[in-house]
Image: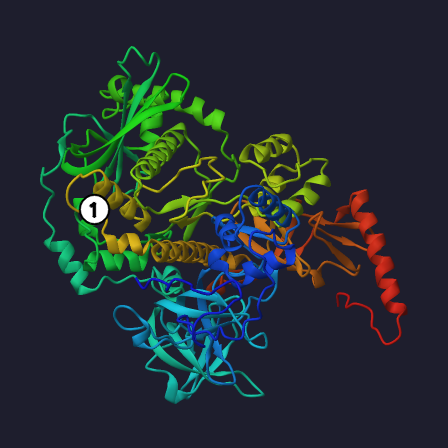
Amino acid sequence: MSRTPRDRTNLAGKRPGKIGRAGRDVSAVEPLNIVHGTLPSREVILRFIADHPQKASKRELAKAFGLKGDSRVELKHMLQELEQEGMLQKSRKSLIRPGALPPVTVLDITTRDKDGDLIGRPAEWPEEQGVAPAVAIRQQSPAGRQKGKAPVAGLGDRILAKIFPAVDRGGPAYTARIIKVIDRRRGAAMGVFRSAPGGGGRLLPIERRGEEMVIDPDYTGGAEDGDLVEIEVARLGRFGLPRAKVLSVVGSVGSEKAISTIAIHAHGIPHVFPPAVIAEAEAAKPATMSHREDWRDVPLITIDPADAKDHDDAVYAELDPSPDNPGGVIVTVAIADVSWYIRPNSPLDREALKRGNSVYFPDRVVPMLPERISNDLCSLKEGVDRPALAVRMSFSGEGRKIGHTFHRIMMKSAGKLSYQQAQAAIDGRPDDKTGPMLETILKPLWHAYGVMKRGRDRRQPLELDMPERKILLKPDGTVDRVFVPPRLDAHKLIEEMMIQANVCAAETLEKKRQPLVYRIHDGPTLAKQEVLREFLATLGISLAKGGNVRANSFNGILAKAEGTAHQTMVNEMVLRSQSQAIYSPENIGHFGLNLMKYAHFTSPIRRYADLIVHRALVGSLGLGEGGITPDEEASLDDIAAEISTFERRAMAAERETIDRLIAHHLSTRVGEEFAGRVSGVTKSGLFITLPDYGADGFVPISTLGTDYFIYDEAHQALSGEKTGLGYRLGDSVTVKLAEAIPLAGALRFEMLSEGREMPTAVRSFHKAGRRDRDQVRKKPGTRPPRGRR
């Protein structure tokens, strides 16, 4: 990793020399009027944070302005006020201007400026914040790096970059120094080639907003009709369709795994292991007993989905024999010791980091590790010796964790069960396998879960009721059916035991002062809280103001909505108000789980973050080979940023694949009617979810009727100006499928249900809006707003 040079910029914005090491001109920064030891004005604080994002924590601000004693308290109150007013927001432990970029950001290089310099924009940017800011990319010479060759990027690449506020106020708002090139040539598009008589053909887009292109006979690249191809735009004319050139043929869309193949290539997900990685995996030998305790007599069992091919966690529970802990239990969680096989900077390690996590599609899995590792040497197979890292946790009778210890062990699984199999045994239907272990293994596990649940109930994590649908495929790769699997106590048992093991990992590493990668989840931003607050007010539900909202505040809201017509709608709005969990070496806690210390430890086969935590435990506890290295510790910022990005990439690919499969499944049913629910409201129309299929489609506002429909964000409604009838988030409706585009995963519906009468608050909103529009119409030289046509 290349470490960012220490920022020597003084408080006046000066630095020796005209060109800073980040490649920006710092000699022309307008100085701030600062008096050391005196609390600065709000304007100076905001300006300083914008210009020095790397020094935007409370501690760094106090240090920069020389504040001590009461002045530091005053600074704290000022920052809290700025947060409450929406002028600042928290990002990890730092403060940033809303809409500002964090110090390390993933960028997509999209264009060049008039001087030929590369311009990028954030890969992830909320639509509600408008257009993403432009960032000038500074290509750095090799001499500017402490080690190795400087990364060089080009148009279409995705990069991890260090962000700096730009000095030139006339150009992009930021400049960036490339830390690492994540993906190459992201500008290349994909589509399906359809041949034309006489040669050449057309490219059918696979993106919802894509457009059809012409491919001339000389530029087909050997593609045949129905091939999924990667192309680049060859020419954009003023008239007619764009023209494209085929770069490579990915495969046929007629194959069983065509839909997931589209997502894999569209998102640049590595899916073929290089020969060096396969060779290292095949050459791996079973782990030895070096630095290990022999736990092969402990009856640990695995409980997984029935179709699971790898098993990376095992559990066991017993009553605590200690007289000092009456009613207490001891829970043991053992996790496959992946760190023994995947050593830092090896071919296996570099490929695992490149992938970040396994990606799960309905028809296949793109694993983080080769099968020799994930499905064999690191799979806790029944009756086979396997290396593991185990944590023994003691809980009081009230469910409080009172202690834990980590161990590097050799274990032998006493049984491989499915969730349904284990649940059936507890419910009085044991089979030949679960019967002998019911009293000695399964019942103690369920008793321990009951004890742990007392602690969970007291902790009150966020309890959203959002059922997860699964797709069952036919042998040809098409959809057979969509269903919601039941949520069993067996699922909850494993989930809670894994959560507590993750907590233990974070606590142990913090106690050892060992750098690690946390799993963090920030609370909702003030802006999102305000949107939710306004929406809930329309239902007569209140949400307290202020920055100290906790997970149980939302549980109270969900409880009030339970059993009402608004239950689904409220659950969705609460979910939308939440931030996205990410990985970070800086800990801010996990809001959703209501935990202060949390690190992913329990799935090192499929998540790189867990592998880092395993190495940190091995190294800090002196458990033998495979510990974390100093280079890794120095690179945790970059690693956390990368794997957070790869996680979002996997989620998008998985979601798009499901959309395409469902669109393909429904493509033969155009014209049929379906029961749906309004799952999103925008100025352009309504998003409709078909609960029976888990599919989403769109009803354009232009097809809703002859009335003028007004978008009310606070009430999440579209309602007619004249009739007062409309549609709100969560409404049950009947729609007709008007169009299905399988390759793009797009569905378009026509609304069949009449709108319902809107609440008084919505009608009042309309009257106010009508007055505003009437005033606009009266102004000379103005036109009325566009209505629907």
Quick one: 82 or 62, which is closer to the camera?
Answer: 62
Q: Residues within 10 Å of mark 1 (few under 14, many from 20)?
A: many
Query: Quarter of the image holding residue 319?
Result: top left
Residue 409 left/right relative to 38? left
Q: Is residue 622 left or right of residue 154?
A: left
* Residue 635 appears in the rendering: yes
Residue 335 shown left or right of residue 571 in the figure: left
Q: Amino acid at mark 1?
A: Gly
The one of 690 and 77 positioned closer to us in this rendering? 77
**Residue at horizontal 26 percent and vertical 13 percent from the top:** 321
Asked which quadrant contains residue 433, the reply is top left
Tell me residue 483's x, y (percent).
Answer: 46, 42
Colouring of the image: rainbow
Query: What residue is rendered at 31% in x and 56% in y?
Result: 635
- Position of residue 161 relative to residue 446, above or below, is below
Q: Is residue 183 above or below residue 38?
A: below
Q: Position of residue 265 (x, y in %)?
A: 37, 66
Secondary structure of the residue carrying numbered label 1: loop
Residue 759 x, y percent position in the rendering: 78, 43
